[in-house]
Image (cartoon, grey):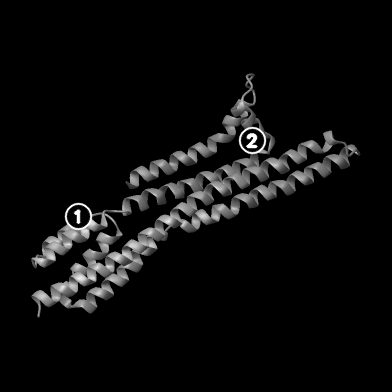
């Protein structure tokens, strides 16, 4: 899994760095079309600013993809897991319950396994273990989300920086030519508008992924809390039945 994510990340980075060269070659094509027009606008928006925004987009998508894969793998069949643990504890078979939790992927399985390893020490110890390890798993779910928010903030800032530079270019052209005609200021205004649009598109794209990930994480945290309560009830029943 880690190897797959590494390859995906490197592939996205390579794609981002090749966009500029690919766009420059596309400017020489004779046949008109949407893709060619898009590539020409990329070059007209100033390759330096546009490439930096594209890098922010690629890196943001790489982190988003990693989180999407991680959270979807973490969303295991909670009902089946808890039912298996409950059946094993009803029979007093703690080892089978441990094996079931150990062989199941996801944060809920990890939390229940930590609790099962301390089940002989009493309910209070199990509860503290579940709470502590639940906080650890919650932190793992939030990992790398801050990087996505960083690229969401940086992308429009880079676009606005291109806007300022484009305006400076336009005024430089006016000063050099001594004329304020549309032809003189058109080049600078293109940089202004194109970089701003690209920055906003990048931020909106990453924002959609970020909102999806937040929704997914909130659902997983709710499942973890509910599963922890049900698991503690099972532990109490086990303690009453086999240790009193």
Give the mark toward the camera: 1 or 2. 1
* SS for dot 1: loop
Q: Which type of secondary structure does the marked residue at label 2 adopt?
A: helix
* Residue located at (34% from left, 66% from top): 136
Q: Is residue 126 above or below residue 137?
A: below
- The x and y percentages for residue 191 are 72, 40
Q: Is residue 166 left or right of residue 81?
A: right
Question: Residue at the location (36% across, 63% down)?
Answer: 222
- Which residue bears the numbered disc 2? 42
Up-down relation of residue 183 to residue 213 (above or below): above
Q: Quadrant of residue 240?
A: bottom left
State the residue at coordinates (49%, 41%): 13
Residue 39 at x, y = what percent? 62, 31
* Residue 204 at x, y percent in the picture: 57, 48
Which label was assigned to residue 103? 1
Marked residue nearer the N-terminal end (1 or 2): 2
């Amino acid at each position: 899994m880690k190897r797959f994510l590494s390859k995906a990340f490197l592939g996205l980075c390579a794609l981002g760095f090749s966009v500029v060269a690919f766009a420059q070659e596309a400017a020489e094509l004779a046949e008109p079309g949407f893709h060619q027009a898009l590539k020409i606008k990329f070059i007209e928006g100033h390759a330096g600013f546009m490439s930096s925004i594209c890098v922010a987009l690629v890196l943001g998508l790489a982190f988003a993809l990693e989180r999407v894969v991680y959270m979807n793998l973490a969303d295991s069949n909670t009902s089946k897991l808890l039912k298996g643990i409950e059946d094993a504890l009803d029979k007093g078979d703690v080892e089978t319950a441990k094996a079931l939790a150990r062989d199941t992927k996801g944060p809920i399985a990890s939390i229940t396994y930590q609790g099962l390893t301390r089940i002989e020490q009493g309910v209070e110890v199990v509860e503290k273990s579940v709470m502590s390890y639940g906080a650890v798993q919650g932190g793992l779910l939030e990992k790398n989300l801050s990087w996505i928010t960083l690229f969401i903030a940086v992308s429009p800032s880079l676009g606005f920086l291109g806007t300022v530079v484009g305006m400076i270019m336009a005024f430089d052209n006016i000063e050099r030519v001594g004329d304020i005609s549309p032809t003189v200021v058109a080049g600078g205004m293109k940089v202004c508008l194109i970089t701003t649009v690209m920055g906003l598109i990048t931020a909106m794209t990453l924002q959609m992924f970020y909102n999806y990930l937040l929704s997914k994480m909130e659902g997983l945290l709710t499942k973890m809390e509910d599963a922890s309560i049900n698991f503690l009830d099972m532990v109490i029943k086990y303690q009453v039945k086999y240790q009193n």
